[in-house]
Image (cartoon, helix red, strand yellow):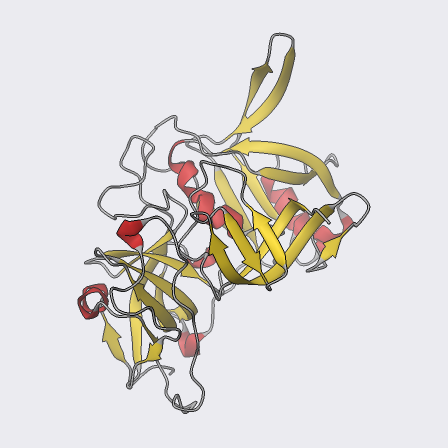
Amino acid sequence: MEGSDATVLSISELLRQSRPFSATSSLRSAPRRRRRFSPPPPESSRSEESSAPDSSPRVLTPLDHAAMLVGTVTVPVGDGDGHPSAALKCSSNGTCFQFSDGASRICCDVVDFSAHLLGKRIRVVAFNFIPFKHGGGFLEIIRWSFAQSQGGLRPCSSSSALPLGSGSSSEHCSKAPRLMICGCKLCRSRDVTKVLMENSNGSSGSHVYSVPEFVYFCGPASFWHPAITKLIGDVVVLSGLSKKLVYIGKDESQVMFMTTEKSLLHLLETSSKMLAHERTSNEKTGDCSIYTGLVTGIYMQGMVVELDKKVWLLLTDQQFHPPHSLRVGAVVRTSSSFTQY
């Protein structure tokens, strides 16, 4: 079993070391020759979460022994009033996942993300750790496996449902993501079982996802923001939603969907991607559906991001709090952006 000889570290041990490093549960790949390079966190005005107090290293030093973490990844924990819990100091305002080993909690991101891992006990067999100057830190999970699986395999099921509305009944709502839905009679039906069967096992390719709809994630569901951004391009099924008529101005109205305490996010066995191309753009209109690139610079308090030393990403939402995973050296994917030539 992978990592059988690895030392299981705790979050408190990571925080006590207070230095950036990378670790893996197996040293068979000769770490002295093949090191995982990773630049420091982005320059930012968030002084309370700047990089380590020493001289900003350009690489993360790997541990000289095998190590792993055991715990659970969850969406941000709320305080009951629709705001991130003060128990974990994080200026990203609910845009980071959280990793807990049962005794402590830390901000994290998952490179090889699967929504099936949320709330499940996992082994983190490769990771980077970056401490913050005034306490706390950020965990970058590179490789993981379920703790109860055999040989590191991930269990599969035809579909699984994750409750979005469990917890408090706060009416706080996050920004509504836009979903492109299939307008056929089956996909708009209330029979969730039939919809799941039709969209599983690759059958979703026969559907056309072209009808835009906005869904407001309210109460506990508002903390699902980091998970929803990871699912961009995936085909999912949302059930237990309610409709509300929203008035825009005096004469215009529009029907919106909102989550409820009974809302469920259904994950399909086969993760069907609606978007096939990693880089597509239209030079005439300036529309850019997807661009994937390496972050080579972050400026203006995180509102301007340089990709591949040639593309500038301008974040126009002044209320947006960049997650800790948005750092120099990270690979990011943008969608539904506008390109100026």
For the N terminus, the image quarter is bottom left
Does residue 325 appear left or right of residue 199 in this picture?
left
Query: Which residue is nearer to you in this view: 12 or 56?
Result: 56
Task: List x then y, in percent, for residue 12.
Answer: 19, 64
Which residue is located at x 20 percent, y 70 percent? 17
- 136 relative position to 232: left or right: left
Residue 294: which quarter of the image?
bottom right
Residue in front for this viewpoint, 263 or 73: 73
Describe residue 314's horizontal placement relative to residue 83 as left or right. right
Q: Position of residue 189 (x, y in %)?
A: 66, 33
Outermost residue to the top? 250
Q: Is residue 246 above or below residue 309?
A: above
Answer whether residue 107 is visible to the viewer in this image: yes
Q: Residue at x 39, y 66 (%)?
A: 40
Q: Residue at x 19, y 69 (%)?
A: 13
**294 up-or-down from 242: above or below:** below
Can you give x and y, in whole percent of width and height, for residue 92 in the image?
37, 46
Q: Is residue 158 visible?
A: no
The image shows residue 121, relative to residue 242, as above or below, that is: below
For image coordinates 73% across by 45% down, the residue present is 287
How many labels were placed on the picture?
Answer: 0
> Is 254 left, or right, of 221 in this rendering?
right
Which residue is more in the foreground, 30 or 341? 341
Q: Quadrant of residue 133?
A: bottom left
